[in-house]
Amino acid sequence: MKIEQLYTGCLAQGAYYIESNGEVAIIDPLRETQQYIDKARANNAKIKYIFETHFHADFVSGHVDLAKKTGATIIYGPGAETDYDIYSAKDEEEFKIGALTIKVLHTPGHTLESSTYLLIDENGKDHAIFSGDTLFLGDVGRPDLAIKSDLTKEDLAGMLYDSLRNKIMPLADDVIVYPAHGAGSACGKNLSKETVGILGEQKKTNYALREDMTKEEFIKEVLSGIAPPPQYFAKNAMMNKTGYSTFEEVLQKGDTPLSPEDFEALANHESALVLDVRPQSEYIKGHIPNSIFIGLNGQFAPWVGALITDIKQPIILVTPEGKEAEAVTRLSRVGYDNTLGYLKGGIDAWKTAGKDIETLKSISAEEFAESVKNDNVNILDVRKDGEFNSKHLEDAQHFALDTINENMNEISKDKTYHIHCAGGYRSVIAASILKARGFTKLIDVAGGFGAIKKTDLPMTDFVCPSTL
């Protein structure tokens, strides 16, 4: 028996490779599927099944492409309906992978078709569960994402309560838990940084698995503090339901070098968004006017999905040398398939061609502190709600990056703003969006709140996020 977790940090997502006696099952594969085919081929094995725990909302799964390439059967839980061929399994139906058995446990709640896959070893012992978004380490899946459902989130939360208590909690304490996500995913509230756990430990420590918890208490707790889902979630879920272009087609189109002249023409005539994915330090020093910064060195794909509202938006890229295909790949993971190419030679080629360059003023936390003490400074804190409410500068205005597109009217183009986040990544994203919308008086605070905390500027008292 071989089990391998293939974890992608940018998406905080775990895909799984299971092999026994030359047969392979893949659970929740990523968009780029060649890695699974190569792994099976190296082991002289054949991919037999592709198990999907549910219709994912936070990324586009590679199940459709992988099935076409391998002939493997796509398996969903009960009630799943798609525009492509699948096998919709019955509750407690079993599938054989070599000497292993994979048993379907229908666990609705996160979505209606959500299922947990119980792996039974060659001796008939329950070995592990692949819990999808039903059970995370430290949390459970949010019950407010069902697509085209007339059920309320309270109805789904009630289903999730029953699923956990009737299907998951009766399993032995030594069963291994392999969830679909870890910390950083928007599919839950308080996910652990760990990506593999033991069920017995979750029974002791996960708030949602308390034995004395009533259904009413569960519904109230699981629904409290859930931020609105990112706008791309419903679009990704629909792509997973209806199908999509092949990854190879997307990569071939996007990984196309463009001269500065062709690049500028696409921006002007195709209304292509110029997306700069270099480190923020490089963007600050010089960038193309009206370009948007979202760096590959951060949570790139989720921020693209949250902030670029049109999933079919034509995109052209400014990338570090050698990172062109990576950028196209990571865009495709969240359904942004309309990348039209990248600037050949990067920003240096743009400068050599005599094209306009803009910069972003960035100052240290110490310089910022001096400005606050000596002037009437406008401060924008672009961190998430929980971060801001936990501790912030007394005079800061909360202007969360998550909702920047909806809240632009809260600030004025006539004022100068000092912008900070936690470490410096999100503040530059926010500044780039504001600049593209005509806000020109912007100053980034390098190092963000992590650096600002080391100054003597007045701040609110710390409030533990778990009590908010």
Image (cartoon, rainbow, N blue to C red):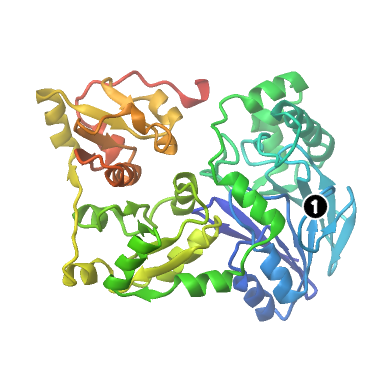
Give the residue displayed 41% in from the left and 23% down from the top: 389
Which quadrant of the view contains residue 379? top left
Secondary structure under tag 1 reads loop
* Rendered location of residue 433, percent (x, y): 33, 45
Q: Horizontally, is 35 left or right of 163 in the view?
A: left
- Left or right: 214 as drawn, with respect to 281: right
- Residue type, label 1: Glu
Residue 163 in the figure: left or right of residue 60: right
| Residue situated furthest front in the rendering | 269
Where is residue 173, by image quadrant?
top right
- Residue 305: x percent and y percent? 50, 49
Q: Is residue 248 above or below residue 141?
A: below
Q: Residue at x 29, y 52 (%)?
A: 290
Q: Is residue 166 visible?
A: yes
Check disc 1 and report the residue beneath it.
81
Look at 21% across and 39% down and name the residue there.
442
- The vertical placement of 51 against 368, above or below, is below
